[in-house]
Image (spheres, grey):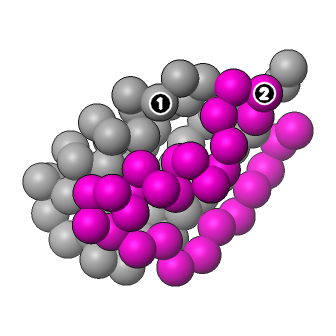
Amino acid sequence: MAATRVLLEVPSISCDHCKRAIETAVGALEGVDRVQVDVAGRTATVDFDQGSVSLEAIEAAVAGEGYEVAARHVTGA
């Protein structure tokens, strides 16, 4: 299955600790190929296989670290 990319807007990202926490939690999910957090842009870009992991699971991993996803923008299929 082709990879899907989602851009998550996470307004509470403010430092490198936030970056590491989100990248570690989301990156540990089966089916996630890549996670990149942009502290200045307050976003997380995730490349994943929809057949292996759901967008809801990705957002739950972000929430589990204490960060709220304000919006999502999905590309690819």
Answer whether residue 33 is visible to the viewer in this image.
no
* Element class at badge 2: loop
Residue for point 83% across, 42% down: 76
Marks counted in the figure total: 2
Residue for point 47% across, 30% down: 29
Disc 1 to disc 2, C-alpha distance:
13 Å
Is 73 situated left or right of 51 in this image? Answer: left
- Residue under numbered circle 1: 29
- Residue under numbered circle 2: 51
Residue 76, numbered circle: none
Residue 50: horizontal and vertical position, in percent?
Answer: 76, 34
Is 44 situated left or right of 77 in this image? Answer: left
Tell me the quarter of the image containing the N terminus.
Answer: top right
User: The residue under label 2 is which amino acid type?
Assistant: Gly
Which residues are drawn in magenta?
50-77
Residue for point 41% across, 40% down: 26
Q: Earlier in the sequence, mark 1 or mark 2?
A: 1
Whether residue 67 appears in magenta in the rendering, the answer is yes
Residue 13: horizontal and vertical position, in percent?
Answer: 27, 69
Q: Residues within 10 Å of mark 1 (few under 14, many from 20)?
A: some
Whether residue 38 appears in magenta in the rendering, the answer is no
User: The residue under label 1 is which amino acid type?
Assistant: Leu
Residue 49: horizontal and vertical position, in percent?
Answer: 71, 28
